[in-house]
Amino acid sequence: SGTRRGMTEVMDSATAAPPSTVPDQAAATHVTRSGSEAERTALAAQPGTAPELLYFLANDAAVAVRAAVAANAATPPQADRILAADEDPRVRGVLGRKLAGLAPLLGGRSPDKLRRLAWDTLCRLATDAAVAVRAMIAEEVKAMPDAPRALILQLAGDAAMAVAEPVIRFSPQLTEADLLALVMSPPVAETLAAVARRPQIGETISDAIAATEDPEAVAALLGNASAAIREATLDAVIARAGEHVAWQEKLV
């Protein structure tokens, strides 16, 4: 989509390798106030830029500058909180991807105030109104073995498949009980097919999907070569396949 392409372009610009040197404090301060957009963007991307200047640049008028601040690992959590409310979803997407990459270090009840602030910011972005922002977070954490479980469950239950499906299909954090709960009470109909496409699902999950008789989900299950399906379950699907051409093709 155009939104996704635009976000990718801003993210690429924000995460491009900055120059290897940082101006002295006086020169850097001058850049934040009077430098060109290119100069401010380069400064915002520097890991050695002073936190107070990054905080100042988080309110810059240029999207590219704010995106560079959002991507910078040295940006203080207080500035990240400002950027989490940025009017441009591309900036929020850059920030979400950065914080999602740190998710294993942020989750839980950390005694560190700044880590708790960063975790709260990530949780807010995981419920962002823009699907593209939530999708960037999901892509970052979908295969993490140590991602915070609460975050994984939230993303897996998202109504947008661009967010939920990557997590449902690939997260090692999801248990059979979690998957069964998604099948029994799917947030949206498409959730069933996403579970059916997950590699290596067991017979219990296959039984539950087949029992829904959802045309798309059962077709996805039959097309999942790694799914374990009981013979009795397969026989039941065959008995109902006369009404579903897509099932017949998969069965053949």
Image (cartoon, helix red, strand yellow):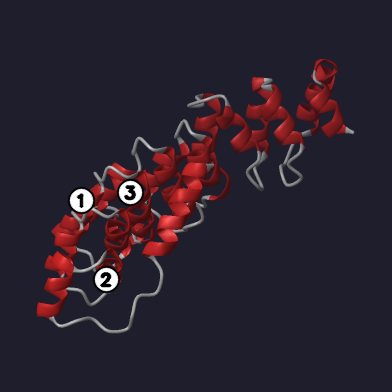
Q: Residue at x 63, y 28 (%)?
A: 208
> Residue 64's x, y, as percent?
33, 58
Q: Quadrant of residue 237?
A: top right
Residue 111 seen in render:
no
Image check: 54 left or right of 198? left
Frontmost of labels 3 and 2 is 2
Between residue 63 and residue 203, name the one nearer to us. Answer: 63
Q: Position of residue 117 (x, y in %)?
A: 19, 53
- Give the residue at mark 3: 92
Residue farthest left in this picture: 26
Choose the circle earlier in sequence order: 2 or 1. Answer: 2
Q: Give the answer, above or below, for where 192 lies relative to 241.
A: below
Q: Is residue 32 left or right of residue 13?
A: left
Q: Which residue is mark 1?
A: 81
Residue type at tag 2: Glu
Residue at 22% x, 64% y is 75
* Residue visible at 64% across and 43% down in the picture: 201
1 vs 3, front mark: 3
| Disc 3 from disc 2: Cα separation | 22 Å
Is disc 2 placed on a helix, strand or loop? helix
Amino acid identity at mark 1 = Arg
Residue 39's disc number: 2
As rendered, which of 41 and 96 lies closer to the eye? Answer: 41
